[in-house]
Amino acid sequence: MVEVLSPSDRLADTDSKMLEWIDNCVPLAWLINGDTRTVSIYRAGLPPEIQTGVLSVRGEGSVGGFTLDLLDIWAGL
C-alpha cells in the first residue's frame, strides 16, 4: 500500500492508518511525505523505517521486483 501525505493530512493520523493496515495483514506499506522528502516503510512486527532523500523504494515479499520511482513525485512538489 502507498499513501502520499497531503497538505491537509496530519502525520499522526496517517501514521495510525498505516499501522492499522499492517495490523490487518498488509505486509508492506509506504508513507510518502513530500514536505520532508521522506518515505516511511511499515512492515509487520517492526518499527517504521524512515528513509530521507531516496530516489526510489523497492518492494519486498509479494511485490518483490517492483520499484517505485520517486523522481516524478519529488519533481511535482
Image (cartoon, grey):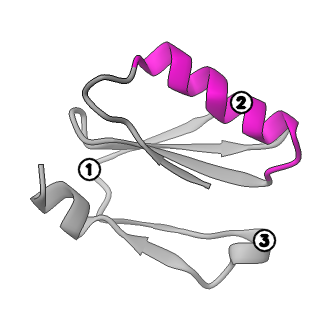
As drawn, 13 above or below 68 = above
Residue denoted by label 3: 61
- Which callout, 2 or 3, points to the residue nearer the camera? 2
As drawn, 67 above or below 5 = below
Residue for point 43% across, 20% down = 11
Q: Which of 14 and 30 is in front in this view?
A: 14
Figure quadrant of residue 43: top right
Residue for point 76% across, 30% down = 20
Q: Earlier in the sequence, mark 1 or mark 3?
A: 1
The amino acid at mark 1 is Gly
Alpha carbon separation for disc pair 2 and 1: 23 Å
Figure quadrant of residue 32: top left
Q: Is mark 1 on a helix, strand or loop?
A: loop
Figure quadrant of residue 6: top left
Residue for point 78% across, 71% down = 61
Alpha carbon separation for disc pair 1 and 3: 24 Å
Residue denoted by label 2: 19
As drawn, 55 above or below 66 = above
Q: What element carries label 3?
A: helix
Q: Horizontally, is 59 left or right of 56 in the view?
A: right
Residue 66 location, x and y as percent?
Answer: 57, 80
Residue 34 location, x and y as percent?
Answer: 25, 41
Residue denoted by label 1: 53
The amino acid at mark 2 is Leu
Quadrant occupied by the N terminus = bottom right
Q: Horizontally, is 39 left or right of 63 in the view?
A: left
Count of number-bearing discs:
3
Question: Which segment is the magenta one?
Answer: 10-26
Residue 49 location, x and y as percent?
Answer: 57, 39
Magenta span contains residue 38: no
> What is the crowding at mark 3: few (fewer than 14 residues within 10 Å), some, or many (at least 20)?
few
